[in-house]
Image (cartoon, rainbow, N blue to C red):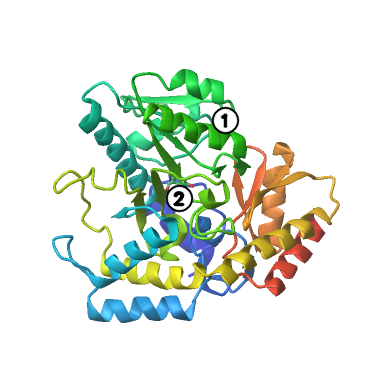
Amino acid sequence: MTYQELKAREQQYVMNTYGRFAIALSHGEASKLWDIEGKRYIDLSSGIGVCSVGYNNKKLVDAIAEQTQKLMHTSNLFTTAPMVQTAKTLVEATGMGKVFFANSGAESNEGAIKLARKYSYDKYGKGRSKIITLKNSFHGRTITTISATGQDKFHDYFFPFTEGFDFAEPGDINDMKAKADAAACGIMIELIQGEGGVLPMDQTFVKEAETLCREKDLLLIIDEVQTGIGRTGSLFCFQQYGIQPDIVTTAKGLGGGLPIGAVIAAKSCCDILGPGTHATTFGGTPTVCAAANAVLDIVNQPEFLEEVIHKGEYLTKGILSLNSDKIESVRGMGLMIGIFVNPEERADLVAACLEKGLLVLTAGTETIRLLPPLTISYEEIDEALSIMKTIF
Ligand SMILES: *Cc1c(COP(=O)(O)O)cnc(C)c1O
């Protein structure tokens, strides 16, 4: 089937909720992808930060194959070894308490919001339920997580939205303090706003938000759905900010391509959600946890994480040395990189990349976002840069 034929069928049968690129992907190897017509691409998108260890990664594929032959799924009415192993690794790597497994980023954030509200209810009773998030944030697409998302464009159509969210100005601790009134129970932030445009938070602001949480007994929730699992050069980005969150949520890169999310709670609040208070049918199923264990085996190694930082610096330097007047600035951490361009030129630049065999993402209004597989080779980065050179 040609792309045109497949696309026609898609339009007939699949809801038109995504602005998709005009190619259909067929298979991948390392950080390269091929479309169904045989054209090859260097991939700087990894799904959307999901395929953290690249395509057809032997260790990951073998782990999934082995587990599916043994036991693909069982309910959460039973214990399984892969699930316990994933939780143990995440807890030991973060110094936190316990984990709840979900299936996506939004669902992990839902769990974190429920946990924060119940923490406050158990301790102080009703009336303390507000969670402060940031303007320009992104926390997911469920009714509650779009309510938590600090962008007006998401707050339309789907009324009524979940109550109890307020949005502070990123970097403005006084605004945050003003909103942290007697009705608040938590603060939820991304350390680098991903969908919002690859905008790293100021460290002083983040430390002050942590202090505010300690003073007012608010839970500090760090949304690491995009920044987690080695993306920024540490297993979690918060580890580079010198803070100790109460809750960390993660998802995208954790399963290397299979859907898994996690709510990691500190020892002080990891027993708040007791039996019957929270659940999900597919959460922490042995197959996704076998995948997560393979990903964590690869990523959660000091040498691997150091390489993420080196590759990020190498790619960033390479982009800057294009010396292009189309590029206003380059920001990010590790292999989460934003190229800031003129919003009016962005669509053409992205289309030119696709045409020349380079897959990139966008974010915010002026950012070309790069989230390559963390395993990308220097050769693949060089090839990406040489394509960029012809476009920028
Ligand atoms: C992608 C993302 C989400 C939503 O994750 P889904 O798996 O799409 O539900 C939430 N928060 C952040 C920071 C994200 O980048």
Question: Residue 290, how many percent across, how many down?
Answer: 34, 72
Question: Residue 128, how many percent across, how many down?
Answer: 29, 24
Q: Secondary structure at mark 2?
A: loop
Q: Is mark 2 within 8 Å of ligand 1?
A: yes
Out of 32 and 310, give the one closest to the viewer. Answer: 310
Residue marked by disc 2: 225
Q: Amino acid at mark 2?
A: Val
- Kindly give the residue lying farthest to the front in the view shown: 215
Residue marked by disc 1: 170
The image quarter containing residue 363 is top right
First in sequence: mark 2 vs mark 1 = 1
The image quarter containing residue 180 is top left
Report the disc number at residue 308.
Answer: none
Residue 357 visible in the snapshot: no
Gap between marks 2 and 1, in whole Å?
18 Å
Q: Amino acid at mark 1?
A: Pro
Out of 349 and 68, give the one closest to the viewer. Answer: 68
Could you tell me which residue is drawn at 50 percent across and 64 percent down?
Answer: 51
* 122, above or below 66, in the image: above
Q: Secondary structure at mark 1?
A: loop
Could you tell me which residue is drawn at 75 percent across and 63 percent down?
Answer: 385
Give left or right: position of 187 versus 46. Answer: left
Q: Is mark 1 within 8 Å of ligand 1?
A: no
* 214, above or below 259, in the image: above
